[in-house]
Amino acid sequence: MNRKIKIALIAAFVTSAVIGTGAVLADGRQCGPFAQDMRVVADKKLHTLHEQLQLNPSQETAWTDFRNTVQAQASKAGERFRDGRATPAATTAIERLERGQQRMAERKLALDEITSATRRFYATLDQTQQRRFDEATRQFGPERFGRHGHGPREGV
């Protein structure tokens, strides 16, 4: 293929990608992980986890409690994100700090609920299931997302 044609095709592709992205942003749709309903994302991950754990009938009640807690918190996380986007920006340093404290308090409560439900569910698992749970949920933890998808730091 001629070099000029290749360059023209690449330029057309890049231009269409830029215009498409601009159109999405101008349309008001959100980009990124919170563009999806967080409950839908959680449901997919929970479904996969449930299959991997191969639970017995006596463990299903604890699973249901765990799943419901995670789903509720995923829904709340999506709501908090959307509410935060709709809230006018804080204008002073004090307002920003106070909002940050409020968000941290909300996230701590959410993490406390998930931790409690996880402890109850984890206690019903045998050692093999606990290893599967640990491995499967490693990607869900704060280390994963807190480091922009680069996984946990060494030694943590």
Image (cartoon, helix red, strand yellow):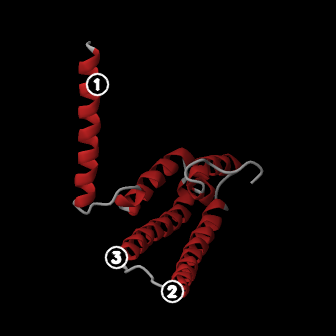
Secondary structure beneath label 1: helix
User: Which residue is more in the foreground, 99 or 135?
Assistant: 99
* Location of residue 102 with respect to 3 vertically, above or below: below
Amino acid beneath label 2? Glu
Q: Residues within 10 Å of mark 3 (few under 14, many from 20)?
A: few
Residue depicted at 28% across the width and 21% down the height: 6
Q: Where is residue 2 in the image (x, y as percent from the top left)?
A: 26, 13
How busy is the neighbourhood of tag 2: few (under 14 within 10 Å), some, or many (20 plus)? few
Name the amino acid type tagged 1. Answer: Ile
Give the left or right position of residue 5, taking residue 66 as reference.
left
Q: Name the residue under label 3.
A: 86
| For the residues bearing labels 3 and 1, Cβ distance under 8 angstroms | no
User: Can you tell which mark lies on residue 95?
Assistant: 2
Question: Relative to residue 10, is residue 15 depicted above or below?
Answer: below
The answer to which of 28 and 152 lies nearer the viewer is: 28
Q: Residue, x 35% and y 61% (percent of image)?
A: 37
Left or right position of 30 against 149: left
Whole-angstrom CA distance, mark 3 to mark 2, is 16 Å
In three-dimensional space, the C-alpha distance between marks 3 and 1, rounded to whole angstroms, equals 42 Å
Looking at the image, residue 10 lies above or below residue 150: above
Task: Give the quarter of the figure containing the N terminus.
Answer: top left
The answer to which of marks 3 and 2 sits earlier in the sequence is 3
Q: Residues within 10 Å of mark 1 (few under 14, many from 20)?
A: few
Judged from this view, the residue extending furthest toward the right is: 155
C-alpha distance separating marks 1 and 2? 50 Å
The residue positioned 52% from the left and 50% from the top of the image is: 49
Badge 3 amino acid: Ala
Looking at the image, the residue that sits furthest to the top is: 1
Q: Residue at x 27, y 32 (%)?
A: 11
Residue corresponding to mark 1: 7
Q: In which quarter of the image is residue 25?
A: bottom left
